[in-house]
């Protein structure tokens, strides 16, 4: 949440991914939501263009249109609804874990804590520390591993986080499923953007020094405190 409102509810429509790596999951899938009937109808038709044919008595406010028909299974929808009912309890627990972690951290010496705009509203599923230099970050990882706390920087020479732009070949190379090269050839676009793997050096520098620690529903507050204790020990030894 941000300032008391769930992310995805600030505009006219929103969507949440519910794949395996998310806070709640239906295996693979997601939720779309809106309080606008016009938008809701378009979303339904995008998922299943045949709805007006099967339910003509409903009085649809829009004519049907053809689409790619990515209609998920009913079992996924049922699981998603049940999972959604649990989100409050899950977030309450993960936020408790993160608060215990943050409160147990000593004043940092060799790193800074990740800035969070709304600490009360964030999900509390992770915390990040940004070490002062890349070399020091590697040493922190090694020392934390020796303490039993696995850690790695978000971007390094090892297995990378695939969410980082420099691994998105389809975007960097401007590859399109459309033979005309859309969206880069859209007539409304008059630019000529070029991408490169090193185009955002400040971003990569931060990610090279960022260590992320996760919290989940199977953990207790004591686990979070032990994680913080390991970081404190390493920071006292290496942070200067």
Image (cartoon, rainbow, N blue to C red):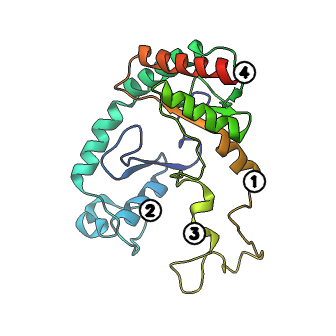
Point out the image quarter for the N terminus.
top right
Q: Mark 4 or 3, which is nearer the eye?
A: 4
The residue positioned 29% from the left and 58% from the top of the image is 72
Q: Position of residue 35 (x, y in %)?
A: 48, 45
**How many residues crowd around disc 4 within 10 Å: few (fewer than 14), some, or many (20 or more)?**
some
Label 2 or label 1, whichever lies nearer to me, is: 1
Residue picked out by circle 2: 42
- For marks 2 and 1, the one nearer the N-term is 2
Q: Which residue is mark 1?
A: 201
Q: Position of residue 172 (x, y in %)?
A: 63, 69
Can residue 1 be seen from the camera position used here? no
Q: Identify the residue under disc 3.
A: 169
**Separation of disc 4 and disc 2 at Cα?**
53 Å
Between discs 1 and 4, the one toward the N terminus: 4
The answer, for residue 42, to whether it is visible in the render is yes
Q: Residues within 10 Å of mark 1 (few under 14, many from 20)?
A: few
Q: CA gap, disc 4 to disc 3? A: 38 Å
Quadrant where the C terminus sits is: top right
What x and y, as percent, mark residue 113? Answer: 67, 27
Q: Circles 3 and 2: CB distance less than 8 Å? A: no
């Amino acid at each position: 949440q941000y300032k008391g409102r769930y992310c995805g509810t600030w505009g006219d429509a929103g969507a949440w991914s519910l794949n395996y790596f998310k806070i709640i999951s239906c295996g693979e899938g997601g939720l779309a939501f809106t309080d606008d009937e016009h938008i809701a109808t378009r979303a339904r038709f995008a998922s299943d263009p045949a709805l007006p044919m099967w339910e003509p008595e409903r009085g649809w406010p829009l004519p049907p249109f053809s689409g790619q028909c990515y209609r998920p299974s009913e079992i996924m929808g049922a699981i998603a609804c049940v999972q959604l009912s649990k989100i409050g309890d899950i977030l309450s627990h993960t936020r408790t874990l993160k608060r215990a972690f943050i409160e147990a951290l000593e004043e940092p010496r060799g790193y800074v804590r990740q800035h969070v705009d709304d600490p009360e509203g964030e999900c509390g599923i992770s915390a990040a520390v940004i070490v002062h230099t890349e070399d020091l970050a590697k040493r922190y990882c090694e020392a934390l591993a020796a303490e039993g706390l696995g850690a790695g920087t978000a971007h390094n020479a090892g297995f990378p986080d695939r969410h980082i732009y420099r691994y998105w070949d389809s975007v960097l190379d401007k590859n399109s499923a459309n033979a005309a090269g859309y969206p880069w050839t859209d007539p409304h676009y008059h630019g000529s953007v070029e991408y490169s793997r090193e185009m955002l050096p400040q971003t990569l520098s931060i990610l090279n020094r960022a260590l992320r620690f996760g919290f989940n529903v199977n953990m207790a507050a004591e686990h979070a405190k032990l994680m913080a204790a390991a970081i404190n020990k390493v920071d006292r030894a290496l942070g200067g």
